[in-house]
C-alpha cells in the first residue's frame, strides 16, 4: 500500500465509483466523508454530459453525498471554459437539453457552425444527424467531444457510449476531434490546479481503466481502479494498463490510505 504514501489529493470519478445510475455504491457515502474529514482535498471529475452542473450536484446530494458544487469538475464545464476563451464561436450543441443550460449565451447554428460540441444525446442519434455533422466538418468546422468513452455502466448493464460516433465522424471527415474530458491531460490539470497540488501528489479513483487510470497515469497521477461500475475483470486483465492499486470498491479506500500513512 506504500504506493499511496505520498498522496495529498484525490480525484474521484462519479458514476460507477460513487454510484451506479441512482444507487450509491455500498459504503461510498461514508468513504468520501471519511476521506474529506481527514483533510485530504478531493475533486470529483466526471465525463458525464447528461446533466447540467446544477442538476448533477442536486443528484449527488439527493443520493446522500455531502459534496460542495465547486468540487465537481465536469467535462461540460471544461468545454464551456474552452469555448469562452474563443472569439465569438458559432456552435452546434449536440447535448442533453439540461446540459445545454450551461451553454446559454453562445451563438448557435445547425448549418453554419464552426464548432460542434458532442455529448450524450442517447436515442437522438440518427443517420441524418450524423450526416449533418459530417457536412459541417467537411466545411471546416471543429469537432469537440465532451469525452470519447467506449461504453458505460447503467442499471440495465453496459451500453455503448459516444466514442463510436466520434470515431465514425473522425474517419468519415478525415479530421480529429478535440477531447475535453478524461483522458485529456488538460482536464486532469484543471482539477490539479483547483486543488493546488502536483500530479505526483494525487491519485485518480476510477472504474474505467482507459479514461480514468491510463489517462491519470500518463500525466503523473497514481491510478486506483475499483471493481465496480463498468469494471470487467476480463477487460482489465487484457489491458496493457497496470493500476497502481486495485480495490473492490471505493469503500476500501480509507483503510488503504490509513495503511499507507
Image (cartoon, rainbow, N blue to C red):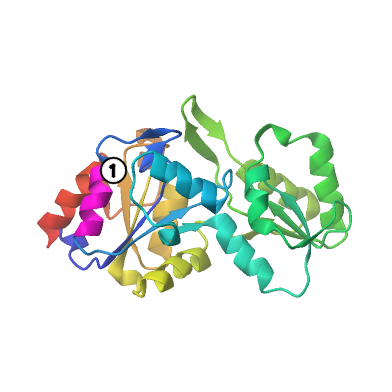
Are there few (<14), some (14-19), or many (20+) residues within 10 Å of tag 1?
some
Residue 97 location, x and y as percent? 68, 43
Quadrant showing the C terminus: bottom left
Horizontally, residue 92 falls left or right of residue 165, namely right
Highlighted magenta segment, given as a residue range: 29-37
Q: Is residue 190 above or below residue 54?
A: below
Q: Is residue 140 above or below residue 197?
A: above
Q: Where on the picture, by quarter, is residue 201?
A: bottom left
Instruction: Say whether residue 177 is visible.
Output: no
Q: Where on the picture, by quarter, is residue 142?
A: bottom right
Q: Who's the residue at 80% across and 53% down the image? A: 173
Circle 1 residue: 29
Tell me, yes or no, whether the highlighted magenta stretch contains residue 32. yes
Tell me, yes or no, whether the highlighted magenta stretch contains residue 156. no
Instruction: Say whether residue 116 is visible.
Output: yes
Q: Nearer the viewer, residue 70 or 144?
A: 70
Q: Secondary structure at mark 1?
A: helix
Q: Who's the residue at 44% across and 57% down the image? A: 69
Horizontally, residue 165 falls left or right of residue 149, namely right
Horizontally, residue 181 falls left or right of residue 109, namely left
Residue 137 location, x and y as percent? 82, 56
Residue 226 location, x and y as percent? 31, 43
Q: Who's the residue at 47% across and 45% down the image? A: 58
Q: Where on the picture, by quarter, is residue 91?
A: bottom right
Quadrant showing the N terminus: bottom left
Amino acid at each position: 500500500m506504500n504506493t499511496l504514501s505520498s498522496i495529498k489529493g484525490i480525484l474521484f470519478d462519479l458514476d460507477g465509483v460513487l454510484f451506479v445510475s441512482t444507487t450509491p455504491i455500498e459504503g461510498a457515502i461514508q468513504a468520501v466523508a471519511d476521506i474529506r474529514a481527514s483533510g485530504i482535498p478531493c475533486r470529483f471529475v466526471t465525463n458525464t454530459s447528461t446533466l447540467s452542473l446544477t442538476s448533477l450536484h442536486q443528484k449527488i446530494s439527493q443520493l446522500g453525498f455531502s459534496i460542495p458544487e465547486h468540487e465537481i469538475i465536469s467535462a461540460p464545464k471544461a468545454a464551456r471554459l474552452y469555448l469562452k476563451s474563443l472569439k465569438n464561436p458559432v456552435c452546434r450543441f449536440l447535448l442533453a437539453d439540461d446540459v445545454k443550460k450551461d451553454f446559454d449565451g453562445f451563438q448557435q447554428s445547425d448549418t453554419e457552425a464552426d464548432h460542434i460540441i458532442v455529448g450524450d444525446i442517447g436515442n437522438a442519434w440518427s443517420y441524418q444527424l450524423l450526416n449533418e455533422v459530417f457536412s459541417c466538418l467537411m466545411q471546416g468546422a471543429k469537432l469537440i467531444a465532451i469525452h470519447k468513452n467506449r461504453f458505460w455502466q447503467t442499471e440495465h448493464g453496459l451500453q455503448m457510449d459516444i466514442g463510436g460516433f466520434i470515431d465514425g465522424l473522425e474517419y468519415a471527415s478525415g479530421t480529429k476531434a478535440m477531447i475535453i474530458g478524461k483522458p485529456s491531460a488538460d482536464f486532469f490539470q484543471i482539477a490539479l490546479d483547483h486543488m493546488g497540488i502536483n500530479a505526483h501528489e494525487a491519485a485518480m479513483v476510477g472504474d474505467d481503466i482507459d479514461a480514468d487510470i491510463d489517462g491519470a497515469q500518463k500525466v503523473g497521477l497514481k491510478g486506483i481502479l475499483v471493481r465496480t461500475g463498468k469494471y470487467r475483470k476480463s477487460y482489465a486483465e487484457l489491458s496493457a494498463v497496470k493500476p497502481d492499486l486495485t480495490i473492490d470498491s471505493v469503500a476500501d479506500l480509507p483503510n488503504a490510505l490509513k495503511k499507507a500513512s
